[in-house]
Image: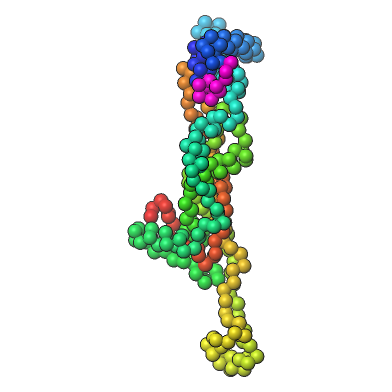
């Protein structure tokens, strides 16, 4: 028990805690002995609460039950008395140190200024040509009329993600999830886009001025009024912009220690569809291609 507690304490002190009161060996050894006493007290409570009739009279069963009580008590002490002393953000900032450091040298993306038009179209046209697949632009068609849902075929706007974006997203995740001592958040990066709304646009009708009304009524030909500044030509009006949700998986992890006192990284709890940002796009600029973009082509 003593060796494991000391190893955990020294690891936490070196990596995260940096407590001046535990800076020398003598202080750490003395603190560890106090932890041993606390673990023994907790192990006694665990033993007293357990129905020991299930242990049986065989000595090996008694030993195993006692060791299990010691192990549980040890884990509780590590969690409360060692990990619990770590500042709430210390583990998070260490595991995400690279993103936080590089964020100082890269600008954050202005999501309102992302080029979801020409630049995105050019990117996907190049990718499609390299992969020998066909893509198309929604254009002025008032409504998508394909067989498959447009959400499955729409190609997301291209974002040039930076480390500053990742730091900002991490801080957003911390604000949303909160952090306890020993916990940190990891994000799958970069995010991917999902078309939440294809937007809405409609086509106006041609309206002739008084001077051209009779001619238009007779022929129905709008071309005669092309240069007239008083006639209202047919137009496409975008009433609602398309909206993309840029999401990723957020992992909430916490440090644990194995039986030797070495730190290990658990799988953690996954939170899917953590929204990093929302981008608007002109519905006419939506690029449509075969499923599997980014995976199969």
Quadrant (top left, top right, bottom left, bottom right) of the C terminus: bottom left
Residue 234 sits inside the magenta stretch? no
Q: Is residue 277 visible?
A: yes
**What secondary structure is the stretch in magenta mostly built from?**
helix
Expressed as whole percent of the image width and height from the top left, the position of residue 18 reads: 55, 22
Q: Which residues are magenta?
A: 12-21
Q: Is residue 74 above or below residue 92?
A: above
Q: Is residue 96 above or below residue 230?
A: above
Give the color scheme: rainbow, by chain, secondary structure or one colour: rainbow
Q: Is residue 252 above or below residue 203?
A: above
Q: Is residue 73 above or below residue 135?
A: above
Residue drawn where x is 55% and y is 40% of the image = 170
Residue drawn where x is 56% and y is 59% of the image = 280
Q: Quadrant of residue 198?
A: bottom right
Residue drawn where x is 54% and y is 29% of the image = 91
Expressed as whole percent of the image width and height from the top left, the position of residue 266 reads: 50, 30
Residue 17 sits inside the magenta stretch? yes
How many numbered discs?
0
Expressed as whole percent of the image width and height from the top left, the position of residue 214 reads: 62, 94
Judge by depth and name the residue closer to the eye, 183 or 167. 167
Judge by depth and name the residue closer to the eye, 135 or 159. 159
Expressed as whole percent of the image width and height from the top left, the position of residue 99 reads: 49, 39
Q: Is residue 61 visible?
A: no
Residue drawn where x is 58% and y is 63% of the image = 241
């Amino acid at each position: 028990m003593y060796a494991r507690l000391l190893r955990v304490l020294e690891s936490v002190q070196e990596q995260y805690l940096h407590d001046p009161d535990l800076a020398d060996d003598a202080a750490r050894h003395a603190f560890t002995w106090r932890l041993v006493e606390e673990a023994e007290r907790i192990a006694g409570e665990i033993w007293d609460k357990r129905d020991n009739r299930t242990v049986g009279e065989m000595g090996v069963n008694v030993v195993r039950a006692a060791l299990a009580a010691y192990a549980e008590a040890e884990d509780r002490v590590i969690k409360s008395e060692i990990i619990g002393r770590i500042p709430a953000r210390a583990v998070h900032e260490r595991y995400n140190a690279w993103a936080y450091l590089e964020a100082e040298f890269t600008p954050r993306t202005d999501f309102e200024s992302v080029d979801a038009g020409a630049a995105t179209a050019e990117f996907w046209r190049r990718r499609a040509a390299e992969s020998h697949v066909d893509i198309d632009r929604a254009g002025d068609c008032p409504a998508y009329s394909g067989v498959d849902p447009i959400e499955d075929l729409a190609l997301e706007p291209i974002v040039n993600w930076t480390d500053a974006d990742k730091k900002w997203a991490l801080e957003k995740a911390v604000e949303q999830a909160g952090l306890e001592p020993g916990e940190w958040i990891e994000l799958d990066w970069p995010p991917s886009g999902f078309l939440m709304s294809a937007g809405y646009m409609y086509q106006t009708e041609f309206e002739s001025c008084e001077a051209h009304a009779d001619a238009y009524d007779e022929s129905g030909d709008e071309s005669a009024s092309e240069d007239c500044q008083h006639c209202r030509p047919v137009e496409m009006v975008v009433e609602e912009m398309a909206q993309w949700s840029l999401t990723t998986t957020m992992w909430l992890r916490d440090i644990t220690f194995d039986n030797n006192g070495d730190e290990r990284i658990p799988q953690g709890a996954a939170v899917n569809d953590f929204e990093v940002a929302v981008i608007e796009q002109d519905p006419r600029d939506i690029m449509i291609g075969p499923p599997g973009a980014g995976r199969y082509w």
